[in-house]
Amino acid sequence: MKYLDEYRDPAMAHDLIERIKDLSASINRKTRFMEVCGSHTVAIYKAGIKSLFPNLDLISGPGCPVCVTSSRDIDQIIRLAELPGIIVATFGDMIRVPGTTSSLQEEISRGAKVSVVYSPLDALGIARENQAKKVVFLAVGFETTAPTIAATILQAEREGVRNFSILSYHKLIPPAMKALLAEDEVRIDGFLCPGHVSAIIGSTPYEFIPKEYHLPAVIAGFEPLDILQALFMLLMQIKGNRPAVEIQYSRVVRPEGNPGAMKKLWQVFQPADATWRGLGVIPESGLVLRQEFAHYDASRQFDLSVEERADPPGCQCGQVLKGLQRPTDCPLFGRVCNPQQPVGPCMVSAEGSCAAAYKYGRS
Amino acid sequence: MEEKRILLAHGSGGRMSRELIERYLVRQFENPMLSLLNDQAVFPAPAQRLAFTTDSYVIDPIFFPGGDIGRLAVCGTVNDLAMSGAVPLYLSCSLIIEEGFLFSDLERILCSMKEACEEAKVQVVTGDTKVVNRGGLDKIFINTSGVGALADDNLMICGHRAQVGDKILVSGFLGDHEIAVLSQRKNLEFITDIRSDSAPLNLVVEPIIQQGLGQYLHAMRDPTRGGLATVLNEIASQSGVGLVIEEALIPIRDEVKGACEIMGFDPLYLANEGKLVAFVEAKKAPEVLSVIRGTKYGQDAQIIGEVVAEPKGVVYLRTSIGGTRILDMLATEQLPRIC
């Protein structure tokens, strides 16, 4: 298939695989790379890349927006869904995520109105069609989705739609990478940087990785050849001892990113501290609506106060998100926690590291 | 003019029910057994061994490119019979209809059922009709049961019989049905040329048996909900064998691959309504493949892998770049991803 099969070409893959094996053998120690994008996690498992390189340790970081949403935030969402006259609009991944006592899926069975949408603009459409209801879109995602949600807010403002609002649980990737590197126990030899996020933010926000931590970073695409080439580039940087931010995914990512999208994003949102599941509060790693758009902030319109409750006992999602444990190290993995009955969020989203490990990686 | 709609009274058992049955069902499915209007069909046993199956059809939307709920209701049950090697003969047809359903839609569905019956050479010999309150169900549900005859005593096709060394065949492109249906779903409409593959698979299986190759078919299943991956896992676990599949050999259309890329779906989990997976004795696999390729619904058939001894119950996929990974069952419904 055009623009797809070219990036899955077996002969080229074979050549790259041999070169990576040689390079990794010449480095003479096990190298550990972290990807911080759920689509990379799935792509690596799906192509069977882990099985090819015993000397490479490929670990998954906090790259799935659903997985890093704290259980308190999920509890707030559940609280929202219970309120009368509300339609919750959400991307599909969110409906099965367990809070401390329930999930949206369970609330649907109790009569909550939840619509799965494929774009925030669809949620705005639902608001137009249901004037008597209040439609709240769950704005979960990284820098990739934030600009389209900003554009939706601007559209709502232009049209004067007043029964639409959002709950912003947006997260920003570079601050999370910084927080990870600042932790002593986390050992990473390089980052496979996310392709889609970088298409928006460009390569500059990752410069602290080589400058402050002397580690390589490569922005990669999602096809098997993309990932193989990016691994090769990471190893070359280690071999040559010249860490830098490089763009493998140059057919999509420019160093400056997408300035138009960023402009919209900052027009509507401003950075704020955010709680990441497993990582805790990270300064300036979330997005909240600016004062002039505060009337679209559902957390100001509705009473969403919830009790503080602990995460489920035994769940190691936090350790998994930091790359300190493999999904299979968790005592719950595959026993009480599986995709049908997820305990932690890493098992819910198809792009969560536990779900991917369960689906593709068990042996 | 307002279009004629189904009323609750059409399911009351009275005169209006009778009219619905005679005017629509009996007229479409015209055959001597049904026309007797008895409470049951009576027929002589067509063989020593019979196959019997049932399935309910609740699809949304009811009309989609390449088919509709009616064609599905005939083909689905015919296919379940055909997967045993049986020749499908008789169907029952039970309609549960929502009050207010358009007669014109009902007629379109029945007409499509009739065409599918003619193609599969089966007869609807008994049936039932119920009407429920508006909102009691979504438009129309159909249940069909089917009876088929196993004339050949050598046929022993069973999910437990896949054997080490068997070749694994699929009869054509996978995923067309689910992508065609998804393309019509509200909020997800996208334009595609993909059409549902809904088809009667007895037209693929019968020639294999007629060529005297039936005894080499060890296990056979149609990968409907849960797709190829689910069927492979079922057979691996039932037969206590391992399977190795070559990703590069699995026939999937570019358009289906593309739609999956956009929505974050895996084509190996997509539902099919006119494809089969067969586990065939290795030495006869090329012959069976060529017979399947000679049929109307099997032209794109492929051998995609083989049965191995270990590890039992596990399906391995050799990826196109040469890696290996597990191909697991579908855990839950595939949900569109966030980014």
Image: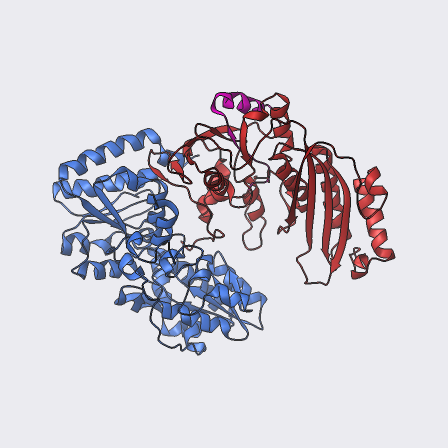
Task: Give coordinates of residue B312: x percent, y percent.
Answer: 40, 38
Question: In which quarter of the view is residue B64 placed?
Answer: top right
The foreground one among B2 and B141 is B141
Looking at the picture, tell me which residue is in the foreground, A29 or B36: B36
Colour treatment of the image: by chain
Q: Any idea which chain is the red one in this picture?
A: B
Residue B99: percent from the left, percent from the top?
74, 60
Instruction: Identify whether B10 is placed above or below B57.
Output: below
A190 vs B85: above or below = below
**In the rendered image, which quarter contains the N terminus of chain B?**
bottom right
Q: Is residue A21 magenta?
A: no
**Residue visible at 36% across and 57% down?**
A346
Query: Magenta residues?
Result: B272-295
Confirm whether the magenta stretch covers residue B292.
yes
Q: In which quarter of the image is residue A44?
A: top left
Q: How many marks?
A: 0
Is residue B100 among what the camera can see? Answer: no
Residue at 31%, 60% (x, y): give it. A317
Residue A128 drawn above or below residue B335: below
Q: Which chain is blue?
A: A
Return the x and y of residue B338 as percentages of the image width and height: 42, 55
Which residue is outermost to the right? B15
